[in-house]
Image (cartoon, helix red, strand yellow):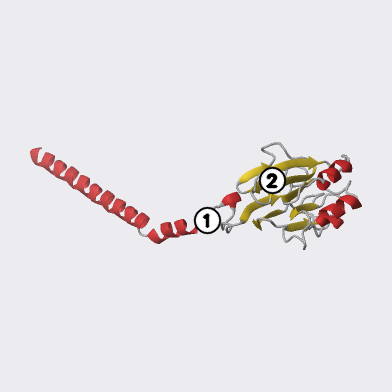
Amino acid sequence: MRVSGVFRVLALIFATVTTWIIIRNHMGFSIKTIRLPRWLGSSTKETQVMKHKCGLIKPCSANYFAFKIGSGAANVVGPTMCFENHIIMSPVKNNVGRGLNIALVNGTTGAVLSQNAFDMYSGDIKHLVKFLKEIPEGALVLVASYDDPGTKMNDEARKLFANLGSSYAKQLGFRDSWVFVGAKNLRDKSPFEQFLKNNPKTNKYEGWPELLEMEGCVPARLF
């Protein structure tokens, strides 16, 4: 019985040692396999995109302002406007509306002057015309459409937008998508403008084209 007991103890020790070696080797292998692809970790860090003002990938140069404007998505998600990392208008701020959403920014300091939404489906176009006529010299004008920006649009409003540097205001119609940055009395057409026509054959949404998103660096004193 004693010899048998010794064998049992030895067998238990052998099994314990063997198990420990297997576990140790397995853990060592696991640790190695985790540590080996260090390049993957460094690559992940290298590919992490550093975001700058308004989420831009690259920072703007001196005397340039960072901006990002997104039009509304159909009649569900409202537009957004960011300027110099400041959210001027957005659904979260609850200061956007159907039609044209417009913000005025000081073209020298970047300070927000005002913002407003104009209902272009059932609103009074006179309010928009008055607003456009009173835009001060040196102000940057940021525009984003939502739902329907064109039903109430008339020739006078189109001309005022054209004077701000717009190339597409004359085409703006029912449920089109439009984002734009301009300034009063521009010598040339603004390079900051995107436009999509409402077309049942190409619309991303059933009755609306897809949303537009425009970002970049606008020079101070664009005018």
Q: Residue 123 lies in what quarter of the image? A: top right
Instruction: Find residue 148 and report its horizontal and vertical position in percent.
Output: 83, 46
Q: Residue furthest front?
A: 137
Which residue is the site of mark 2? 80
212 is higher (above) or lower (below) than 120: below
> Quick check: 5 left or right of 181?
left
| Identity of the residue furthest to the left in this view | 2
Q: Which residue is tagged 1? A: 49
Pointers 2 and 1 in contact (C-beta within 8 Å): no
Q: Given the current orientation, which residue lies at the most extreme bottom position? A: 188
Look at the image and tell me in which quarter the C terminus lies: bottom right
Name the secondary structure under disc 2.
strand
In the drawing, what numbered circle is on residue 26? none
Residue drawn at point x = 72 percent, y = 46 percent: 104
Q: Residue at x 65, y 58 (%)?
A: 219
Task: Where is residue 36? Give x, y as percent.
Answer: 35, 59
**CA separation in Å, label 2 and label 1:** 22 Å
Residue 144 locus on image (x, y percent): 75, 49
Residue name at image x 75 percent, y 49 percent: 143
Give amino acid for label 2: Thr
Observer-side mark, 2 or 1, equals 2
